Amino acid sequence: MKIIRANDYADMSRKAANIISAQVILSPDSVLGLATGSTPVGVYRQLIEWYKKGDIDFSKVRTVNLDEYCGISPTREQSYRYYMNHNFFNEVNIMPENTNLPNGLAADFDTECIRYDRLISDLGGIDLQLLGIGHNGHIGFNEPDQAYGKMTHRIELNQRTIEANARFFEDASRVPHYALTMGIKAIMQAKKILLVVFGEDKAEILYKAVNGPVTPSVPASIIQLHPDVTIVADNAALQKFTFD
Ligand code: PGA
């Protein structure tokens, strides 16, 4: 596991974007696993800037996102499809048909989850998976104390996550209670993982995820077992770590 320290949010975003950019330059048809949330916004912004300068070409890139709420139309700004379109896809030359998220409006969620896993497998698997971490250690919407062996599945969000995500809705009562998420097993099958972490409020959970026991009570701790993980985090998020 490599841990890269960043001075601040802009530095974290640039360093992580550099890693994604290198992936796309080396393998233009990469399959990128993408994440939503506040943390990666700056990464996408940086990639857009480099695209506009002519430094990166996304025309052959394929993407699969980690998760999507159940029951929210992709045209609503709280949906992760909307987030991805507005924060990234619409601003670069990626083909819309090459961008994928679980369908939170599917008539049958079990069938949708099977479709999504098959899609990832048909794409040849994920070359680089971008991740954020929740305050409770979740990755994607894999909440604490779920079995580690799951592929894409429907999950009930726990109260802490609903409260954390209420900032994007009128109030907490509007946050959907269910989502479709790639499971831990699916995330661990990515060839490389890039975890971005920002801010003092993530310091404790990041430390536990990296140095604590590998346990479903801290879902992100599983990445200790992945052979190719890079964490890019700012000094505040790394304040519990000691470096030589
Ligand atoms: P955040 O979310 O980047 O908005 O803090 C991270 C996550 O919950 O995965």
Image (spheres, rainbow, N blue to C red):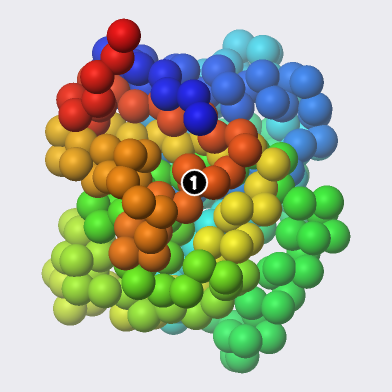
- Judging by the rendered image, the residue that carries numbered circle 1 is 223
Looking at the image, which residue is at 25% across and 25% down? Answer: 241
Instruction: State the count of labels.
Output: 1
Q: Residue furthest front?
A: 213
Quadrant in the rendering for residue 198: top left
Neighbourhood count class around disc 1 (C-alpha, 10 Å): few under 14, some 14–19, many 20 upward? many
Q: Relative to 207, does residue 116 appear above or below in the rendering?
A: below
Q: Relative to 28, does residue 190 appear above or below in the rendering?
A: below
Does residue 207 appear in the picture of this structure?
yes
Q: For the residue labelled by badge 1, is the local secondary structure a helix, a strand or a loop?
A: helix
**Looking at the picture, which amino acid does disc 1 mark?**
Ile
Q: Relative to 190, does residue 14 appear above or below in the rendering?
A: above
Quadrant in the rendering for residue 52: top right
Looking at the image, which residue is at 72% across and 31% down? Answer: 58
Quadrant in the rendering for residue 236: top left
List x then y, in percent, for residue 220: 40, 51
Residue at disc 1, CB closer than 8 Å to ligand 1: no
Horizontal side, residue 186 vs residue 165: left or right: right
Q: Relative to 114, does residue 210 appear above or below in the rendering?
A: above
213, 162: nearer the viewer: 213
Quarter of the image containing the C terminus? top left
List x then y, in percent, for residue 112: 65, 80
List x then y, in percent, for residue 242: 24, 19
List x then y, in percent, for residue 152: 59, 71
155, 204: nearer the viewer: 204
Looking at the image, which residue is at 18% across and 25% down? Answer: 239
Looking at the image, which residue is at 80% across and 60% down? Answer: 121
